Amino acid sequence: MVVAVKRNVAGLVIVFVGAAVVQLAVSNTYLRYVKPGMRWMLLAAGLILIVLAVADVLADTRKKPEGEEHDHSGDDGHGHHGLPKAAWLLLIPIFALLVVDPPALGAAAASRQSPVASKPIQPKSNSWLADNPQGGPVNLAVRDYSVWAVWEKESMKGRSFSLTGFVTPAKNGNWYVTRMGLTCCVADATAFMVEARGQAAPPKNQWVTVTGEWAEPSKRVDGDVAALTVSSVKSVTAPANPYE
């Protein structure tokens, strides 16, 4: 009886794990943990966990001998039928995933990384600038601007750009427009930061769209940091997918 009850509880825990994974994928909350392309894998994994757990419990129930349900000899005082009460604490983080809305990585995570732009492996084609006539701001991902504003200066000079990201405060009143980039999941998240000049810093973690002109990168001991002379700052709602 002890083994049967423990197995049923283990199956219940796995069902909750599967349900939590499915809920994250369906509600788009998974975008705070992994890249969009992993949605279907998460759904499949969650459903497989639920199906396997239910099938295991049903198969185990059918195998129980008659009269076994009346055998309480396994109750040793540690919980129901020998199951330690502490084991139920394992359900707390699972329920937390189902009911708590976790925030995406923000300024706290970004401030622990360097704003220096890494050198790209290959030069970037200028076609993306050619498609945007001179005079109008180019809507550009923060990660792209943070790299090409440093390593493709001649292509960027004299151009206006529009960037959307969250505010990361720096020293001496400076601040960055920031986006986190993922290779696979939040465990490998990289901060891409652009120094915003000419405007006062909005509140920390506030999502903004800034428009301005390319500026000479800031020099640091460990490298150069992309910069933008900002002419306007507009507060916006965080996008469904906060990562780039």
Image: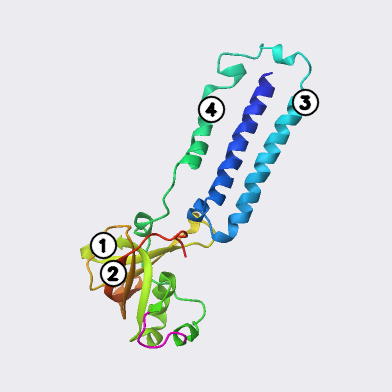
Instruction: Tell me whether the residue at label 2 lies in contact with that at label 4, contact meaning CB atoms closer than 8 angstroms.
Output: no
Q: Earlier in the sequence, mark 1 or mark 3?
A: 3
Instruction: Find residue 45 and report its horizontal and vertical position in percent.
Output: 64, 48
Specify the quadrant of the image occupied by residue 163: bottom left
Residue highlighted by disc 2? 233
Specify the principal SS of the magenta part.
Answer: loop
Q: Counting residues from the N terminus, which is met first, the one under dot 2 or under dot 4?
A: 4
- Mark 3, residue position: 62
Q: Which quadrant holds residue 61? A: top right
Q: Decide which of tag 4 and tag 1 comes sooner along the chain.
A: 4
Q: Earlier in the sequence, mark 1 or mark 2?
A: 1
Residue behind mark 1:
202
Amino acid at pointer 3:
Arg
Label 4 – label 1 distance at C-alpha: 44 Å
- Secondary structure under the numbered disc 2 in the rendered image: strand
Magenta range is 131-137
The CA distance from mark 2 to mark 4 is: 49 Å
- Tell me, yes or no, whether the two marked residues, 4 and 1, touch with CB atoms within 8 Å: no
| Residue 241 as seen in the image, left or right of residue 153 | right
The crowd level at tag 2 (other Cα within 10 Å; few <14, some 14-19, many 20+) is some
For the point 39% across and 59% down, the residue is: 238
Give the residue drawn at x 36%, y 78%. 161
Residue 175 placement, left or right of 11: left
Instruction: Tell me which amino acid carries mark 4.
Output: Trp
Q: Dot 3: few (<14), some (14–19), or many (≥20) neighbours within 10 Å?
A: few
Q: Which label lies toward us, 4 or 1?
A: 1
Residue 143, quarter of the rendered image: bottom left
